[in-house]
Every structure is written in C-alpha cells, then in structure tokens.
Image (tube, helix red, strand yellow):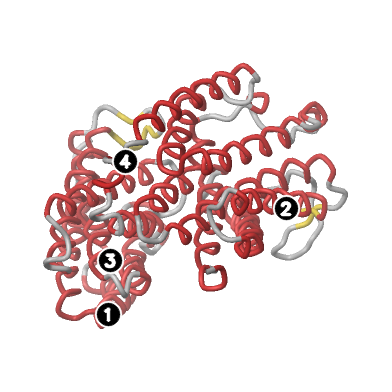
C-alpha cells in the first residue's frame, strides 16, 4: 500500500506541529493559549484554507475530521494536567507528534508484517513509533527542563513511555487515540521521572536476589495451579506470571497478597453459578478462563503503581493508588458476576431505565453491594499489611465505587457502539480508581 500525498501532508503537519512543544520552556503554562488558538484554527479556519486536502476519505464523506481537532485538545490537556511539570507535557507531546506520525508513514510504506492482535497495524509501524517517539520525547524533556535529568535517564524513561504508548496505540479500538494515549503515557512518564536516583539503591538491596527467587517460585506455582483450576488460559499464565513477579519484586509479599486477594475474589465470583450464567448467555467466555488481555487490563495500572511505590519518595501515595486499582478491579468483577447471577432489577446509571441482565453498563443493587464488599476487603487488607494507614480504607472503597460507576457509564455509552471493548474499559476504570484513591492522600496522611 502506497502512501498518498494527502496522508503524507497530514502526517507532516502532524509532526511539524510537535515542534511547538519547544515553546513550553519560554512560555510556560501560557502555552495553553497557543493550544487553544490551534484548536480554534483547526476547527474553524483550516477547512477553509485547504485543510480538506489532509482529510481521509471517510472524513470527507462525514464532512469533518475528528483527529485534526482532537490533536490540539490533547496538547491543551497535557499542558493543564502537567502544568507543574511541563517537561512531561512536552515529552508526551513529542510521543504524540513524532511517534504517531512516523508510525503511520513507516507502517503504510513498509509495514507488510501485521501485528497478530491488530491486522491494521504493523511491526514496522510500531517500531517506528517507539524509536521516533522516544527520541522526540527525550529531546523535548531535556530542552524543557535543562539540567533536571541526565541524558541516559531521560532516554530510558522516554523510550519506556514511548513503548507503552505504542502498545496502547496498537490495540484495536474505535476511539481516536490522540487523547488517551498521550495522557496515559504522560502519567507513566511522570511516575518514572520520580524514580530518578533511586534505582541504584533498589538494585543494591541485599534482600533483592532472594525476593526475586521467591517471586519466580511462588508465581510459577500459583500460575500452574490457576491453569490446572481452569481459571486462566495459556496466555493468562504467561502474563499473569510476569504481573505477579513484578509486584512481588517491588512490593514484596505484602503487595503480592493484594494481587492474590483480587485474583481469588474475581475467580470465586466468576465460578459461582457459572452454569446458570452460561445458560443465560451471561457467563465469562472460555469457561471463565482469563487471558493475557484480562491480566493486563486489570493489573497493568497496579504494576506501574507498585514500581512507583517502591522507587519514589511517595510510597503511601502510590500504595493508595495500587490498592485503588485492585479494589476497583475486584469491585467491577464482583458487581458484574454477582449482579448477573442474583440481580433482580438491572438498570442503566445514565437514565435509570430497567434493562435486561447482561446489558453493557447495567447495574443492580445486589451487584453494587457485592462490589462495595469486595473493594472494602481489598482496602482493609492493604491497610493491615501496612501499605498505607487505616484512614485510607474508606477513600479506596470510594475510589473503587467511582471507578466502577465510570466503567458502567462509559460502557453504556461507548462499548455498545463498539468504540471500546471490555478490556479497554477495565484498564480505564482501574486507572480512574487509582487516580481517585491517590487524590485522597491529604486525608490519609
């Protein structure tokens, strides 16, 4: 497939606009007005000044280009969210501009081998995303915050954030990725930036080799047991092992017990009444076995929080976020599985209209109560293990409730339109739960 002149022009402008990230250093947060001006320009003037030449065929048929409008929206959000750390906004902007831009050009021109999980994306395009996004992010990070980071550390964390962004961008979804991907990459990059100067102490810990050995042995045993119990499939064994290994490595057995509690709660709720749910066509697919995507969607945020809890000056903050992610995942699984089994009246939280059980986004009193109980169990266990004070239990349960309600509302609005799948929603609700729990830090310490 050849690269069209319109697509080349579109991506050239896409990348050239990324050079405006250099203004974040002299302008500071005032650069938000530049982004706002760009939004108005793209929305009202660009189509009248020849901008339609950059529109794709489906955008011409629809009469508008959403991606060209969302680009400046993403930049504006990056500046507002990371206004105290503008180098993070600049780096995430670089990933958006040059990572995404070069991925499209390289993928269309040379991407013959497609990704197994997305036939519309290629290995060449994804590699280009990581390489060019990582280089641009590093350059913008160092430029915007001169002297704050060593070149080697900046390169490492920016390539890690670009790798995450490329992975997220490769997942097939119906939504435009100009908003969510750079924001999530920015949050991840911020957490990594806070670890500067602390990796040496972590790696020099005399107890680390034994902890890694225990992590490998314990996870191998439990992964095998979960597979034998038909709780996970083969991909779930591999990814579940990696998730458990990392959590054990960074948060020791205390953090691992929280992961184990979530897994037990989710498995029990899934298996209870499985035949009845299966007969009603409401049961988890593959006989309730969870796969790699389930593991990453439910535990990916928690893994990042475990790393940051161990390697930043904010262990309680990220401990809350860690528990918030798992409490939200446990609440979501419990409310869904128990609600489908015992829910007498299910309704949509957007309009409170009764709907059949199994309707995407539907909630029930029975399922909601099960979710609250599950989140309280996770939150109390985290406090008992010393990850945060007991004053964090209620905030984590509140965060889990907000996360599950977010998932229900967004699911009702988007998943039924095939814009987001269940795994993407699970990732988002655990991210929301983690962020809300972390926001309660002033009330906890």
Q: If you read the primary sequence from the N terminus, does the residue marked by circle 2 or circle 3 appear first? A: 3
Q: In this view, does 133 lie to the left or right of 79?
A: left
Q: Are marks 1 and 3 in contact (CB under 8 Å)?
A: no
In the image, residue 346 lies at what x, y percent?
Answer: 80, 52
Mark closer to the chain start, 3 or 4 = 3
Q: Which mark is residue 205?
A: 4
* Disc nearest the viewer among 3 and 4: 4
Q: Alpha carbon of mark 3 to alpha carbon of mark 4: how far? A: 33 Å
Image point 54% across, 64% down: which residue? 436
Residue 29, numbered circle: 1
Which residue is tagged 3? 89
Residue 70 image point, x, y percent: 36, 65
Q: What element carries label 3?
A: helix
Q: If you read the primary sequence from the N terminus, does the residue marked by circle 1 or circle 2 appear first?
A: 1
Rendering quarter of residue 429: bottom right
Instruction: Tell me, yes or no, if residue 409 can be seen here.
Output: no
Q: Distance between the residues labelled 1 and 3?
A: 10 Å
Q: How many residues crowd around disc 1 within 10 Å: few (fewer than 14), some, or many (20 or more)?
A: some
Of tags 2 and 3, the one toward the viewer is 3
Where is residue 308 shown, x and y percent of the image? Answer: 38, 52
Residue 228 vs residue 89, the one in the foreground = 228
Look at mark 2 in the image and give the residue it sits on.
362
Residue at point 37%, 59% (across, down)? 187
The image position of residue 171, as x and y in percent, is 41, 41
């Amino acid at each position: 497939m050849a690269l069209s002149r319109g697509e080349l022009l579109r991506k050239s402008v896409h990348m050239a606009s990324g050079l405006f990230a250099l203004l974040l250093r002299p302008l500071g947060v005032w650069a938000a007005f530049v982004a706002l001006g760009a939004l108005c320009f793209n929305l009202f003037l660009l189509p009248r000044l020849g901008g339609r030449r950059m529109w794709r065929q489906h955008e011409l048929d629809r009469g508008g280009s959403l991606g060209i409008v969302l680009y400046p929206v993403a930049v504006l959000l990056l500046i507002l969210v990371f206004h105290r750390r503008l180098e993070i906004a600049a780096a995430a902007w670089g990933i958006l501009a040059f990572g995404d831009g070069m991925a499209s050009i390289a993928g269309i021109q040379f991407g013959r081998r497609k990704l197994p999980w997305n036939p519309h994306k290629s290995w060449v395009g994804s590699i280009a995303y990581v390489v060019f996004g990582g280089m641009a992010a590093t350059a913008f990070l160092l430029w915007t915050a001169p002297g704050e980071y060593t070149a080697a550390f900046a390169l490492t964390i920016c390539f890690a954030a670009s790798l995450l962004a490329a992975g997220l961008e490769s997942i097939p979804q119906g939504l435009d990725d100009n908003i969510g991907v750079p924001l999530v990459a920015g949050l991840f990059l911020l957490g990594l930036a806070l670890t500067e100067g602390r990796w040496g102490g972590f790696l020099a810990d005399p107890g680390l080799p034994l902890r890694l050995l225990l992590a490998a042995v314990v996870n191998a045993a439990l992964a095998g047991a979960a597979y034998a119990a038909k709780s996970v499939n083969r991909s779930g064994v591999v990814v579940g092992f990696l998730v458990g290994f990392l959590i054990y490595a960074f948060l020791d057995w205390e953090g691992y017990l929280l992961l184990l509690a979530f897994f037990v709660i989710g498995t029990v709720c899934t298996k209870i009444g499985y035949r009845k749910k299966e007969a009603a066509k409401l049961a988890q697919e593959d006989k309730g076995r969870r796969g790699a995507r389930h593991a990453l969607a439910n535990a990916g945020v928690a893994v990042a929080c475990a790393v940051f809890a161990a390697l930043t000056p904010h262990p309680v903050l990220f401990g809350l976020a860690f528990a918030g992610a798992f409490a939200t995942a446990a609440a979501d699984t419990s409310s869904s599985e128990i609600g489908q089994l015992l829910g007498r009246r299910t309704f949509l939280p957007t309009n409170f209209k009764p709907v059949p059980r199994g309707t995407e986004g539907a909630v029930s009193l029975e399922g909601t109560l099960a979710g609250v109980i599950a989140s309280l169990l996770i939150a109390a266990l985290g406090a008992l293990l010393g990850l945060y004070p007991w004053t964090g239990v209620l905030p984590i349960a509140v965060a889990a409730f907000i996360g599950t309600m977010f998932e229900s509302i967004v699911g009702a609005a988007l998943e039924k339109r095939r814009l987001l799948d269940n795994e993407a929603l699970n990732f988002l609700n655990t991210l929301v739960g983690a962020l809300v729990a972390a926001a309660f830090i002033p009330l906890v310490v």
